[in-house]
Amino acid sequence: MQNQTIIQYFHWYYNEEQNLWNKVAKEAAHLKKLGITSVWLPPAYKSNNAAYDVGYAVYDLFDLGEFDQKGAVHTKYGTKDEYIKAIEALHENGIAAVADIVFNHKAGGDELEKVKVRTVNSDNRNEFTSDVFEIEAWTKFTFPGRQGKYSEFIWDHTCFSGVDWAEDLKETAIYSIQNYLGEGFEKVPSTELGNYDYLMFNDIDYRNQAVINELKYWGEWIVETTKVDGFRLDAVKHINPDFIIEWLDHLNQKYNREFFVVAEDWNVVDIEGQLEYIDITGGRTQIFDSLLHHNFYLASQEENQFDMRTIFDKTLVQIKPELAVTFVDNHDSQPLQALESYVEFWFRPLAYAMILLREQGIPCLFFPDIYGGIYDDKDNEGNDVHIDLASIPEVETMSKLRASLAYGLQREYFDHGNCVGWTREGDDEHENSGLAVLLSTGEEGFKEMEIGKKFAGKTFIDALGHREKEVVIDQNGLAEFHCNAGSVSVWILKTE
């Protein structure tokens, strides 16, 4: 079995001349060579601003770039046909397609409705700050461009628990919709701000059985229409977990398979929330290890002051490795985005070594680290900022090494505040497998590490090319491995 490796195949500002779906199709064979086993694609359905939106301001789940709605037929990434061809190209190369699913909210309603609401305290959503009153809100979704094709379901105010805009008042607030489902918000995993059910736009209410039925039907439609192999679930801490459980169980039972699912439960404070979500959902999903990302970010900022012996402490990959999807950065943490915490460039190869070449967790690469990314936007103060995210050549090399050599018994050498390492002994299934990794956040590093007696007398070289001198393994399977200051070296068997 080949190690699993995911790539997030987009970033917030994707702006290349070639549309993304066509790029996926063109690059599928290259991704296979990199050892990629799954590609996480961005939201493919029509958003409030069809041609430009990243995809998270969901308008019509059934419009994959097929209907003239919200200003265009195509989405930011292309058309429905191009999306399906991209998935076909991935499948031809033995790569799974993971669809990004946004179930928390909808945006861009087609018609106004008069809705009874109460305002809530934005810092404590359990606290009402008004009596019941009426507003006009964009809560009716009729999808006139689609005209009932695929589904005739009409979304109205009974499908939502809250909105943030009153059209008649021209005012922004958190308005809790008062209807037969209950006067407050649903119970969700996150108790931040009292109750973090409401995040943005029109918040979907999963106390409405008609909504649940429609989205279960849509799940069948997206699987049968596109042949996707799994799902990335957006913002799960804001969504009723009972619905997530029901939706996933429905699809797994319907198609008699276990879809790959990874959930975004962003938390950089403590591990308890993620462990609680795993418990609530019975371990049905992988979870992105945002705490490990945060440790990478801190280490890159603190340089040699960060104690590398603690880099995995209280992270999901340490406590529940079988459910951890590890990553260095994503579209939310990249520069100028909402959760900006971008790992410094000097540390990125070190961080990737720690997710790609170890036994625990399933790593997820980030598009700019392979392809780069150049864009402009404004910062929080309104200043124009130019961003140039350089590609990291070591990432491609280490991704290939993960697929071919990162197997077998793992020995740990996390015994120094700046210089840490590990070895993999290899296995019989993968020819020449086995490797040793050493990294330093301070000065040049060296460490004696055991890689296994089967390598006695064998010569090892640095696959990243940072160290020229070769290393010979002694009769006990030991050798002294080296790395440069603020760098990482990956030692592999020298072959003719």
Image (cartoon, rainbow, N blue to C red):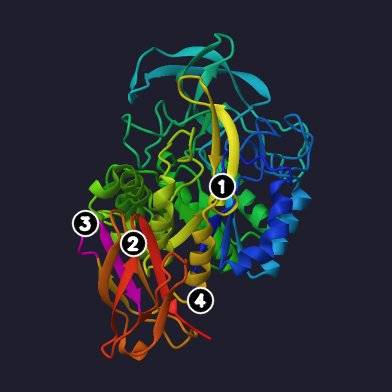
Between circles 2 and 1, the one closer to the viewer is: 2
Residue that carries the numbered disc 1 in the rendered image: 101
Depth check, front residue: 346 or 322: 346
Q: Which residues are magenta?
A: 414-424
Which percent across, then down, holds residue 159?
55, 33
Name the residue at 50% across, 60% down. Answer: 395
On the image, the x and y values in percent for residue 230 come to 56, 59
Who comes first in sequence, dot 2 or dot 1?
A: 1
Q: Amino acid at mark 2?
A: Leu
Residue at (76, 51) in percent of width and height: 82
Tag 4 residue: 404
| Residue at the image position 64 percent from the left and 70 percent from the top | 94
Marks 4 and 2, how far apart in space? 21 Å
Say if mark 4 contacts mark 2, CB within 8 Å: no
Q: CA distance from mark 2 to mark 3?
A: 11 Å
| Secondary structure at numbered mark 1 | strand
Image position of 212 with respect to 283: above or below:
above
